[in-house]
Amino acid sequence: MPTLPIRSEGFAYGGEAFGRLPDGRICFFRGGVPGETAEVEVTVSKRSFARGVLKNVPCPSATRLAPRCPHAVCPGGGGFCPGCSFQQVAYATELEWKQRQLSDFLLRGHLADPAALEMPIGAPARFGWRNRLKLSSADDRIGFFAEDNRTVVDVAHCPLAVAELDVVLPEHRRELARGEVFFRWTARDGVVVNGGDRILTEHLDGFGEFSVPATSFFQTNTRVAAQLARGVTGIIDRLGIAELLELYCGVGVFSLVAAQEVSGLRSFGVELDAHAIDCAGRNARVRGVADRCRFEVGNAEKWRSLPRGMDPDAVLVDPPRRGLSERLIDALKAWRLPHIIYISCAPDTLARDLRRLGSCYKVAHCRLYDMFPATGHFETLTQLDLY
């Protein structure tokens, strides 16, 4: 495949830099800096776009930074880990481009008015935030999957991991050689390897502790998760919501903190993970709000009717990256609740779902929370109001 000079124009969603080939097609590649001309080997050539691998930058930009991690993609460095996409630029540049990406998703499709996009919430720390890691092994290499999702990049340390987790990774090479291993760290429990049936204690600044099964979901960046929880509670308080239906509720964090912050709020949470629901009930009892916060095991994607005895003012949804199912979209449109609070970790599926909901709901506010600094991903919090 040819190696061609490409001037980087910016960053696409997912963290790849992009520029144009001589024939006008867009070419995506990792490790670029806006304004630089890089030598890129084209590895995938399609009719409308191409992908390539950064080989060299003859005249580096004065703004280019040396990546902290040797596995990050950089000119001449041989790095192949796609986890970090922005280590070569300042954090302000990263946050600016993430906000641009969110804006493109929402404004290009006329899904929101520009005034609805609020200033982003940046991460307090760019490194040392990740409290959970999954490492895999293949061909005597132990680490993270590369861009092809098959090759494993051999990794002994990860700068995104909390320090307590990063220092123990080399100690578990023997266990890792037997297949996938999950690492998790909390201040109360320390480093937990393949937690099994253990119940861990997670902490959110300003909101205290939560019981969480070792195998259940909890945000990997608890400092930004606390900011997100404050954002959710602020919306609920501002709108005067009295009853809240929370789908994909996990261990009940958002319902619980809102119930403590907003006097009289009642909530009903639904989650497929039965172990998480057990902990949600436990968390409610510990916090003294069990009389106002109920939780039930259920598949939110197939939810069709409102819980018996509830007349909610709003529904809070926090789906996985694939977004909301068509069945749930239809249910939301049929319920016609005054408000939807949508937490998303994928702006592409968020935009798709906003388009589906657009006949009934308009975007009142949307804010980016940089839950995953240095990577190509981010979280969003969107308030939708019924027309």
Image (cartoon, rainbow, N blue to C red):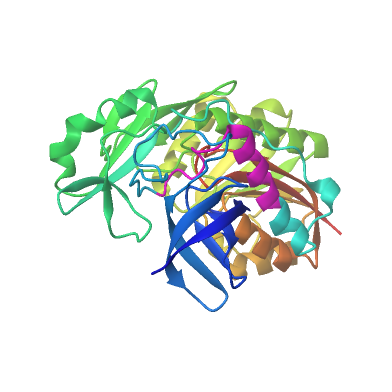
Relative to residue 299, is residue 278 depicted above or below? above
What residue is drawn where x is 80% and y is 56%? Answer: 112
In reply to whether residue 100 is colored magenta, the answer given is yes
Tell which of 245 and 341 is nearer to you.
341
Tell which of 159 and 117 is nearer to you.
159
Q: Position of residue 130 (x, y in %)?
A: 43, 34
Q: Residue furthest bottom?
A: 47
What residue is drawn where x is 71% and y is 56%? Answer: 104
- How many numbered marks appear? 0
What residue is drawn where x is 58% and y is 31%? Answer: 123
Q: Position of residue 341 (x, y in %)?
A: 70, 48
Left or right: residue 364 compared with residue 249: right
Question: What span is colored magenta in the figure?
Answer: 82-102
Q: Quadrant of residue 95?
A: top right
Left or right: residue 60 compared with residue 200: right
What residue is drawn where x is 76% and y is 40%? Answer: 242
Q: Position of residue 69 (x, y in %)?
A: 38, 35
Q: Position of residue 257 (x, y in %)?
A: 62, 30
Q: Where's the C terminus, which quadrant?
A: bottom right
The answer to whether residue 118 shows anywhere in this view is: yes
Tell which of 312 and 208 is nearer to you.
208
Q: Residue furthest front?
A: 58
Relative to residue 291, is residue 39 depicted above or below? below
Left or right: residue 237 compared with residue 191: right
Relative to residue 354, is residue 77 depicted above or below? above
Tell which of 173 and 385 is nearer to you.
173
Q: Where's the N terminus, which quadrant?
A: bottom left
In reply to whether residue 88 is colored magenta, the answer given is yes
The answer to whether residue 11 shows anywhere in this view is: no
